[in-house]
Image (cartoon, rainbow, N blue to C red):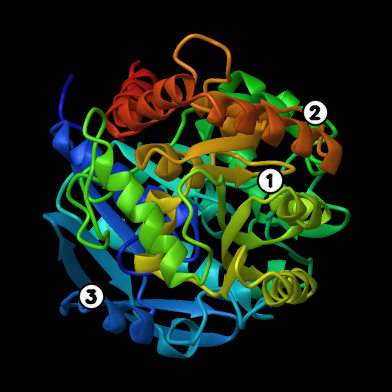
Amino acid sequence: MKKLHIIFIASEAAPLAKTGGLADVAGALPQALRNLGHDITVIMPFYRPIIEKTGVQTKATGDVIEMWTDGIQRHCPLHKASVNGLNFILIEQDDLYAREGIYGPAGGAYDDNLLRYVLFDRVALEAAALLKTNIDIIHCHDWQTGMIPLLLKTQYQHHSNIAHAKTVFTIHNLAYQGVFPAEWMSRLGLPSHHFNPGSFEFHHQINCMKAGIHMSDTITTVSPTYAKEILTPEYGCELDGFLQHHSNKLTGIVNGIDMESLNPATDKNLPANYAAGKIAGKKQCKKALQESSGLEVVDNIPLLTLISRLADQKGIDLLIANAEKWLARGYQLVILGSGDPYSESQLTKLAETHPTQMYFHCGFDMTLASQIYAGGDIFLMPSRFEPCGLGQLMAMRYGNVPVARSTGGLSDTITNYPEKGATGFHFSEATSEAFDIALEEAIAVYRQPRKWSGIRTQALKRDSSWDASAQAYATLYEQIISP
């Protein structure tokens, strides 16, 4: 396989800025591709206050890109950073990117997000053109970069080193499409001849996701099952027909996780370490989690766990509908997350009513997350849809057996009991009843230590690294650049 010159363009990338799984992919996949011998550069906005908090050192390159946007001549300095040898280019425009939130205030979105990200797209292409090499692949992620394939092929062909680059557009979550009023088209200089239903017009508005789907050379999404699901009305978010038209260039590749940092054998956040075949430390982790959460310290009580955004997509209402009966059966429940105010309120009340059985931490804490993954027996993921999901991968890495809805990446990554090599339990219907039945099936096996140990061991041993995913992407890149 020859060395490829690849540009990743994303609105967030770990560890510099993160709101969700997109950042994990944009930070980890380039590292894995780099390990395969490819030349990778990641371009993202310079979210100054957010990036400064990470402690990652940045330095101005001296390059300043001028861009006329929405009636203003903007000067956009470029900065650089390096994380574990991976090079980042950061685009400065403090009035647009140096804000408290990446996409908006808590629970909202900035009104000028289209301006913010079309400017970013244009400057990112100019920054790529400054690199002293011919670019083979420009890999774009979600609606914030959806205009890049269109702009590259209509307005940026004069840059010889990027003109022939092939574009890959990854859909991380089709529910977020970047839909804005049509008036922005003239204000931002978007190609008006593409404002039609076959391109980026959507109910008389601009749809950035449609632009990426239409003009990219290939489309990927984050699991094979989700790639099939988005072609249906149930999951297609009104783009199923449009995606069917482009299905010949659509493929699904499952995400991975950093198996080195997420390792119960070495994780310094844990009170005890453990691994497959050396499991004693997991019991100590369970005891410590029970103690720190104020729960009764009992080893043989099933400890149920959940780490999630509290949102309708995540099926939190299905958990809330079942929680009282699960607690009445004597189970314990530890939850970490935030989001929907109603869900936060309901979980808070449940925890206050059952203080020795249930603990709810509203917010996010990385150390506590590691301790929950390690201390829990069963990890709950009742998602209505889940393009890939990382929670189940992390849970299995720590031997926390998932009970999850059979959708998207959950179907692709969890081997359902009683199949050979089972690592968890599935349920099909997005109902509280189906969720309860699946949990009871899991607990019935939990009561059989030898069987449970086998499932937990398979989960611990599962290879969820980026290696296989990176190889799949590298093969895809080779295919699309081949004559």
The residue indicated by pointer 2 is: 232
Visible residue check, residue 156: no
Q: Is residue 292 left or right of residue 225?
A: left
Residue 186 at x, y = what percent? 70, 70
- Label 1: state its secondary structure: helix
Residue at point 62%, 65% (across, down):
358
Residue 355 at x, y = what percent? 63, 73
Mark 3 or mark 1, which has the lower sequence index? 3
- Please tell me whether residue 91 is drawn above or below residue 149 in the rendered image: below
Q: Give whichever of 38, 461 is nearer the camera.
A: 461
Visible residue check, residue 306: yes
Q: Is residue 19 left or right of residue 187?
A: left
Residues at circles 2 and 3 in contact by the CB criterion of under 8 Å: no
- Split into 4 quadrants, where in the image is the N terminus? top left
The residue indicated by pointer 1 is: 210
Tag 1: amino acid = Lys
The residue indicated by pointer 3 is: 79
